[in-house]
Image (spheres, rainbow, N blue to C red):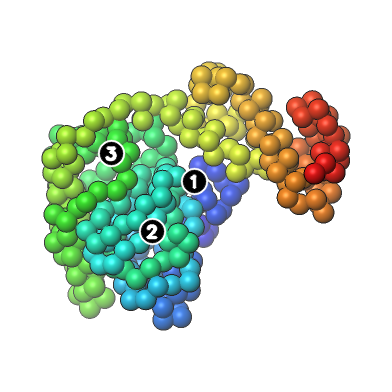
Amino acid sequence: MAEDAQVVPAIFEANDRVYKADTCDPVKVAVERGQMRNVALVHGAYPGLQLPAKCLPELCCVGYWDITKDQSWGLGDHRNEGLELSYISRGKLAAGIAGQETELRSGSLAVIRPWQVHNWGKPNITACRQVYFILDVGVRRPDQEWNWPDWLVLSPEDVRRLTQLLRHNEQSTWKALALGDAFEKLRKTVDAWSSAPNESRLRLCINELLISFLEMLEAHNIPLDESLSSAQRTVEMFLAALPQHVAHPWDLDLMAEQCGLARSRFAHYCKLSVNLTPMEFLVRCRVNAAQKMLREQPERSVIDIAAACGFQSAQYFSTVFKARTGRSPRDFASTK
């Protein structure tokens, strides 16, 4: 995220591509090239018209894409700093949400929690109209308490229930034709903003959408799973993503901090999840990454691969690698 963006640092600061809040740079380029229409009201570094700082500050962005022909770009894996609701009103769009690939068609709603990795286009964007908003509820991990904006008109009980349905269920896609009119009102409100800004109407549209969304969820009698918002779930997600970030200088304190836990609790949940201590699991991830690099990039030096996988010295890397694989890195690389 750009330095001036209004966003809390994301889970892994070591990797801007995946775990920094997305700035939608491909969208900016496509708009400049005339390949799409993107109309949005935003805070921070999202593409669109900047909202005044005090105007619905928790609303990261709200708007729509209108794309009339298939594109040669897509939005790769990223996370938002808020809850995203995205509705396809026309066309279709391939997506990946929390590791699950899907195709959204007209009338489909995608629900993306703040901690969920997702992408748009597999690999490229297709012709569609997507209406969306991202609302920051102050969380970055499944176990954190949600804090909704004070400008919502939902009753405390409705807010509690909506939070419960979103935290204890992680279904990402819904058939949501019943929400089509509410999203269309939102789209028209955003469209009119440049000539007739109306914060009250924008608030009303988002409140109406959330009320309708809650009613839709309630109508499905969703089975809930409280473990989805547990500290152990947070640790499991951290560990699942760790192989992508082996170069980061992790230690026990840093890993525990990323999960919002004390060292002992983090180590406890790590053992429950993978039956290894955090440092043992980290070493395993680093050796696995080194094996992949040695196979696929034989031209790279052992010293370079050691550094790329987070080892502080080539000697320590060789010692650990041989202890786990029975071969030195050089021998491993030379074996077909």
The residue shown at (24%, 36%) is: 165
Q: Does residue 156 show up? A: no
SS class, disc 1: loop
Q: Is residue 241 above or below residue 86?
A: above
- Residue at x-position 36% and y-position 26%: 227
Kind of residue at badge 1: Ala
Give the number of the mark in front: 1 or 2.
2
Report crowding for label 3: few under 14, some 14 to 19, many 20 or more residues within 10 A (C-alpha): many
Q: Position of residue 304 (x, y in %)?
A: 80, 48
Identify the mark nearer the N-term, 1 or 2: 1
Residue corresponding to mark 1: 10
* Amino acid type at image mark 3: Leu
Amino acid type at image mark 2: Ala
User: Where is mark 2, residue-wise?
Assistant: 94
On the image, numbered disc 3 is attached to which residue?
166
Could you tell me how far apart the alpha carbons at marks 3 and 1 are, in whole angstroms? Answer: 20 Å
User: Does residue 143 appear to the left or right of 15 in the view shown?
Assistant: left
Quarter where residue 163 is shown: top left
Label 3 to label 2, Cα distance in Å?
23 Å
Q: Nearer the viewer, mark 3 or mark 1?
A: 3
